[in-house]
């Protein structure tokens, strides 16, 4: 990390490799000190604060979902390497070449098209949300110490900010379209996103160290992506599971939205909604759609939850 972002090498973080950020192992899922209102829209403030931050655990010893900080941490690496902001890089290198209606930092002329989010009631049986309700807990800091972002998520300011960990704005077609080249060997037409070698690495589990320090349940990550994880034995069951084939990789969003690529099946998938569901993973609505697609392709579900 320090090779690309020298200021990051503070507070015991001088030897953290980039892959630890992608693996959610860097120990930086939250900021300890209270952030001022609107901090989420101040990129320089967020990245300088995270550069100074001491990790919550020894980097590499465990994984914990970096829900919001992931976007600033990885986004700053993108900015240092490419010279472009995260939103500009995504637009120029992915969304525009693929013709996607997808934004990280929404232009003002697109604002009237955005559907407001309808919040779900917090799942009272979810250990994650039980921890969020405890002032000062790690989970509370993860969600609630973000400069008011969770309260302002439906505002023009939040839509315009380049929130890489939560602020991508698109529809299901755009979400599936982003993953489409990754389901087709890394390319779509003349647009090559990644090589076959890189694609193989993207789908390989690289972080699975038991119970997630933030989500308080087992989690599995590839480099920046979630992998199938069967938590049906946990108290909240399928709501905190992500059940795909073992070859698939993608990411669940707040409220149960989901996008992924399955290179073996040659399939990409996108599900979005504005009425959010409960839980911290893929809820029953989204999972039922995933299941229907796999069944239509002739897959069968194993006891482990993966589709074969």
Image: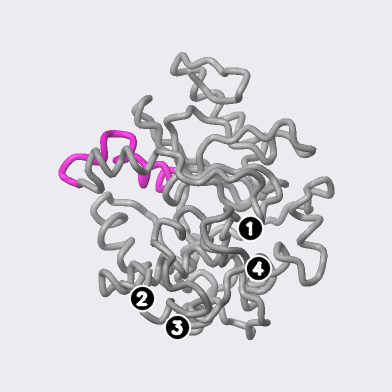
Which percent across, then down, holds residue 15? 42, 68
Separation of disc 1 and disc 4 at Cα? 11 Å
In the picture of the structure, the residue carrying the numbered disc 2 is 5
Mark 1 or mark 2: which comes first in sequence?
2
User: How many badges with numbers are in the image?
Assistant: 4
For the record, the magenta segment spans 173-191
The secondary element bearing badge 3 is classed as helix
Instruction: Classify 10 Å Cα crowding around label 4: few (below 14), some (14-19), many (20 and above).
Output: few
In this view of the protein, which residue sits in the foreground, 256 or 12? 12
Which residue is located at x 52 percent, y 30 percent?
244
Query: Is disc 2 placed on a helix, strand or loop?
Result: loop
Q: Do the residues labelled 1 and 2 touch (CB within 8 Å)?
A: no
Q: Earlier in the sequence, mark 4 or mark 2?
A: 2
Specify how the rendered protein is coloured: one colour
* Mark 1 vs mark 3: in front: 3
Name the foreground residue: 74 vs 266: 74
**Residue named by callout 1:** 117
Q: Quadrant of residue 66?
A: bottom right
Nearer mark to the viewer, of 4 and 2: 2
- Report x, y in % for residue 246: 47, 29
Tell me if mark 1 has few (under 14), some (14-19) or many (20+) residues whose alpha carbon lies within 10 angstroms of its own.
few
Tag nearer the camera, 2 or 3: 2
Residue 44's disc number: 3
The residue beneath circle 4 is 150
- Vertical side of 7 occupied by 108: above or below: above
Q: How far apart are marks 1 and 2 (CA)?
A: 35 Å
Q: How far is the residue under mark 1 from the one under mark 3?
A: 27 Å
Residue 175 falls inside the magenta stretch: yes
Above or below for 21 versus 45 = above
Residue 250 point in image, percent of width and height:
46, 43
């Amino acid at each position: 990390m320090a090779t690309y972002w020298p200021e990051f090498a503070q507070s015991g973080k001088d030897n953290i490799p980039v892959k630890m950020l992608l693996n959610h192992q860097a120990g930086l899922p939250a900021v300890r000190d209270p952030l001022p209102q609107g901090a989420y829209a101040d990129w320089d403030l967020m990245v300088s604060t995270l550069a100074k931050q001491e990790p919550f655990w020894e980097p590499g010893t465990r994984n914990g979902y970096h829900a919001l900080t992931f976007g600033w941490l990885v986004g700053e690496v993108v900015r240092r390497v490419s010279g472009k902001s995260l939103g500009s890089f995504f637009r120029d290198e992915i969304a525009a070449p693929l013709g996607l209606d997808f934004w990280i930092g929404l232009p003002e002329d697109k604002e009237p098209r955005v559907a407001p989010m309808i919040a779900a009631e917090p799942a009272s049986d979810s250990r994650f949300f039980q921890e969020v309700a405890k002032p000062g807990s790690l989970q509370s800091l993860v969600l609630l110490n973000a400069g008011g972002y969770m309260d302002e998520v439906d505002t023009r300011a939040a839509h315009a900010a380049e929130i890489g960990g939560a602020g991508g704005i698109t529809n299901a077609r755009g979400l599936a379209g982003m993953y489409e080249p990754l389901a087709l060997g890394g390319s779509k037409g003349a647009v090559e996103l990644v090589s076959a070698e890189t694609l193989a690495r993207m789908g390989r589990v690289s972080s699975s160290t038991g119970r997630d320090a933030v989500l308080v349940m087992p989690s599995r990550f590839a480099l920046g992506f979630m992998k199938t994880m069967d938590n049906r034995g946990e108290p909240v069951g399928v709501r905190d599971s992500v059940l795909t084939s073992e070859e698939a990789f993608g990411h669940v969003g707040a409220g149960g939205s989901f996008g992924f690529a399955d290179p073996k099946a040659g399939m990409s998938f996108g599900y979005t909604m504005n009425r959010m569901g409960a839980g911290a993973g893929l809820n029953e609505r989204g999972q039922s759609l995933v299941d229907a697609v796999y069944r239509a392709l002739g897959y069968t579900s194993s006891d482990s939850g993966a589709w074969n």
